[in-house]
Image: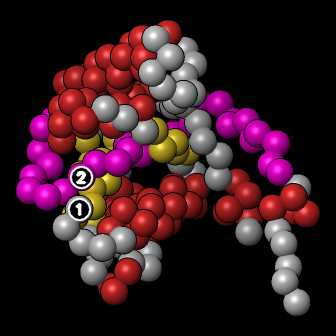
């Protein structure tokens, strides 16, 4: 419970590289997650190259502009808020991918990503899972190209991991009695 309670999403990172052995621990924890039929339909692409991160940030920013336009035209109800996306360049980006030809692959990947983010806490790192740059197919294709994602693999979101520069804020959680029902 301690690790679960300590995990918070953050977008404030120090400009500091994560050592390779810690990155390997993060991905090793991800691949221990359960997967439907034990297919393990995932790949994890680690992006630490500054130029690639700048390009991924540009895709993120462009997706933000497009979502804002769609909201203005009442074509989407995707929540949107302004944010400084420089955090993408300070941290390490992990591009989780799933094989879209395999049943329940996206669900399996989600469990693997949760493991990865929990291990990040264990390694005194912070993380955030961001979906904005993959909302639109055109942007998702750009992310796939930048991360060299091949074949039938799909990218549903990005995981940003790094050393926190601030203590992340924990938003209030719904009370247990509101989310848990018991049938006897």
Segment colored magenta: 145-174
Q: Quadrant of residue 26?
A: bottom left
The crowding category of the residue bearing disc 2, from other C-alpha atoms within 10 Å (few below 14, some 14 to 19, many at least 20), is many
Residue 162 within the magenta-colored segment of the rendering? yes
**Residue 60 position (above or below residue 37):** above
Q: Position of residue 101 (x, y in %)?
A: 19, 67
Residue at (32% x, 68% y) in the render: 105
- Whether residue 177 appears in this view of the structure is yes
Residue 164 within the magenta-colored segment of the rendering? yes
Q: Earlier in the sequence, mark 2 or mark 1?
A: 1
Residue under pointer 1: 100
SS at mark 2 in the image: strand
* Nearer to me, 20 or 118: 118
Q: Is residue 112 left or right of residue 139?
A: right
Q: Position of residue 117 (x, y in %)?
A: 51, 56
Tally the numbered discs.
Answer: 2
Find the residue positioned furthest to the front: 74
Q: Is residue 128 left or right of residue 137?
A: right
Q: Quadrant of residue 178?
A: bottom right
> Are discs 2 and 1 less than 8 Å apart at CB?
yes
Residue at (37% x, 43% y) in the render: 158
* Quadrant where the image shows the N terminus: bottom right
Residue at (22% x, 23% y) in the render: 55
Residue under pointer 2: 154
**Residue 15 position (above or below residue 23):** above
């Amino acid at each position: 419970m301690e690790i679960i309670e300590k995990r918070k999403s953050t977008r404030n990172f120090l400009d500091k590289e994560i050592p390779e052995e810690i990155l390997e621990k993060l991905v090793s924890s991800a691949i221990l997650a359960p997967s439907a039929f034990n297919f393990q339909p995932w790949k994890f692409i680690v992006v630490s190259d500054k130029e690639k991160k700048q390009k991924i940030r540009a895709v993120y920013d462009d997706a933000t502009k497009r979502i804002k336009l769609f909201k203005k035209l009442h074509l989407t109800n995707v929540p949107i808020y302004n944010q400084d996306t420089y955090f993408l360049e300070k941290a390490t980006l992990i591009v989780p991918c799933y094989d879209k030809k395999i049943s329940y692959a996206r669900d399996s990947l989600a469990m693997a990503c949760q493991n990865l983010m929990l291990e990040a806490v264990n390694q005194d790192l912070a993380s955030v899972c961001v979906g904005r740059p993959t909302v639109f197919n055109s942007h998702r294709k750009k992310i796939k190209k930048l991360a060299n994602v091949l074949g039938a693999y799909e990218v549903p979101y990005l995981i940003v991991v790094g050393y926190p520069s601030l203590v992340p804020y924990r938003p209030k959680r719904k009370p247990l009695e509101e989310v848990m029902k018991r049938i006897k």
